[in-house]
Image (tube, rainbow, N blue to C red):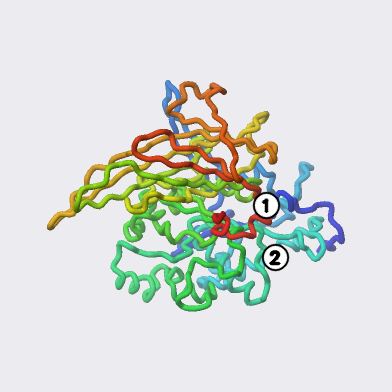
Amino acid sequence: MMPVPSAGKFRIDVAQGLYPIVYVRGFTPTAGSREETFFDAYYGYSETSVEKRNALPPSYQEPIVFEGQLIRFLKEYSYVDAANSGLALALSNPGGNVQNPTRSMWISRFYDKDVVSGKVRNIIEHAEDLRELICERIPRELKLADVDLGPDDEDYKVIIIAHSMGGLVSRCLIQNILASKKEKADRWIHRLVTIGTPHGGIELSAVPDFLEDLVISKGNALNGAIFKRESMVKYLKLPSPAADLQKLFGTYPEGRCLCIIGSDHESYSVVRKATGSHSDGLVKQSNAYIKGAYWANVHRAHSGRKGIVNSFETYENIRRFLFGDTRVRIWLENVQLSTAPPKDNTREFYDIEFSLSVRGTGVYLHQRKQNPCENAFRSDRNDFPIQKLHLHTGFLDTRLRPSGDNFSVFLLTFKISQHQVKQGFLFETQFPERVIYSESMDIRINLAEKSKSVVEFRWLSETQDIDDPGSWQKTLLTDGVFRFPFREAKTISGQICLQPSVWNDEAANVSGEAALID
């Protein structure tokens, strides 16, 4: 074995958060699927996606290729593939290319022992494999690769990106194993990203409760009992049987967590028939996040060709959260109705829909829509006026601006629809949806000079030429908030508010929920 150098020539780029990345895969329910995983060198994280998109004539459609997030990190951030064979092979470099081992990518192959032994171990044992990888193997190999981890290895941490059950394995490491050793998880983990993880368990809403309990919990069909409350309380080491499954209870800063939530249940497998709607086909949207964490909703299925892991939307959210420099809160303020009140025996509610996309790409970083996502903000008429409605907290990386352009440009869309239901003696009458407000606005943010941040906007319905620089309107910064009045409408009024702030380690130590409080 090579001697461990006392002072290496490589240092982890702590300032930009370019720590080693560890991928943790999801659940494989059968022996066959575990073997398939075993024979995949990247445990499924090398899957790509190819889709059709609109194009100009004569083709009218063309393929759009996304290589998958693992490959993109290798391409765009110069990460080194240390999966499986470790850094020794990754840095062998017969061609003489210089690579930085600090930006290394790893996979927790916790199913390997299960396949080799023919015995499925429990989730705590899988989490112990993850601990050994993060706390022992990676720092040892980094030192052998001439990396200086700083005094007492204080510069060393990893980024965990986990899909589905992998997020629970990661939480078991944080809340059970490390907590039992009296170790702070943020000593080892810089950021935690979960993708389609059932933090609140898995509910088969289309199956009667007694049958769900019999099949999944008592019968442990497909080893699915690990997603039931009784099991989760034990391996997450929660303080009581009734404790909230979606809380970390002080074991790790929630503001360092990003949860990607899927909403395309139609594109998943036959399991969606049991899980029902309001889900990614397997995990309910309401169960797919850690309370206090940041989150984004992408319209993707739990896995498969249209899966959440190999989606462009997921990657764009993750890289801005990991390496971005700006956090932006978006909310509505003082929303007031001007519509006539309903007649007697008529119940009235409103769906408020919102989406955020990267301008010119068609990539939705976040969507709250009733169709097709089934997650609009729903408010009863009596809830108005709405003083404040948080829409999203997103992240920007000023380095992603086009060369020579100081602006980051995004498209925000809004739709507010009225729904009325008349109560009858035996039946209800559902009136057709009435859209009372629908608009899209371009937002461009100049963050080149932090002390002189500028936000400009334009309503697309009022813009004749999107290439016209004169179509942009400036908005003033008041008390750290940019405010835009709704485009004039006779049915509703209000303000759209944006609040950019610095995104760094200090900000990440504050819970995402706390960050919403003025």
Secondary structure at numbered mark 2: helix
Q: Residue at x 32, y 50 (%)?
A: 381
**Which one is earlier in the sequence, the residue at label 1 or at label 2?**
2
**Numbered tag placed on residue 504 in the rendering:** 1
Which residue is drawn at the image coordinates 36% and 52% (left, top)?
379
Q: Name the quadrant of the C terminus.
A: bottom right
Q: Is mark 1 on a helix, strand or loop?
A: loop
Placement of the N terminus among the 4 image quadrants: bottom right
User: Residue furthest toward the bottom?
Assistant: 240
x and y percentages locating residue 100 in the rendered image: 75, 48
- What residue is drawn where x is 44% and y is 72%? 229
| Residue corresponding to mark 2 | 187
Q: Can residue 43 be seen from the camera position used here?
A: no
**Cα distance between the residues tagged 1 and 2:** 16 Å
Q: Position of residue 14 (x, y in %)?
A: 74, 53
Q: Residue furthest left?
A: 425
Amino acid under disc 2: Arg
Q: Nearer the viewer, mark 1 or mark 2?
A: 1
Q: Quadrant of residue 401?
A: top right
Q: Is residue 361 left or right of residue 132?
A: left
The x, y position of residue 420, in whole percent, is 25, 48
Is 486 on the left-hand or right-hand side of 105? left
- The label shown at residue 320 is none
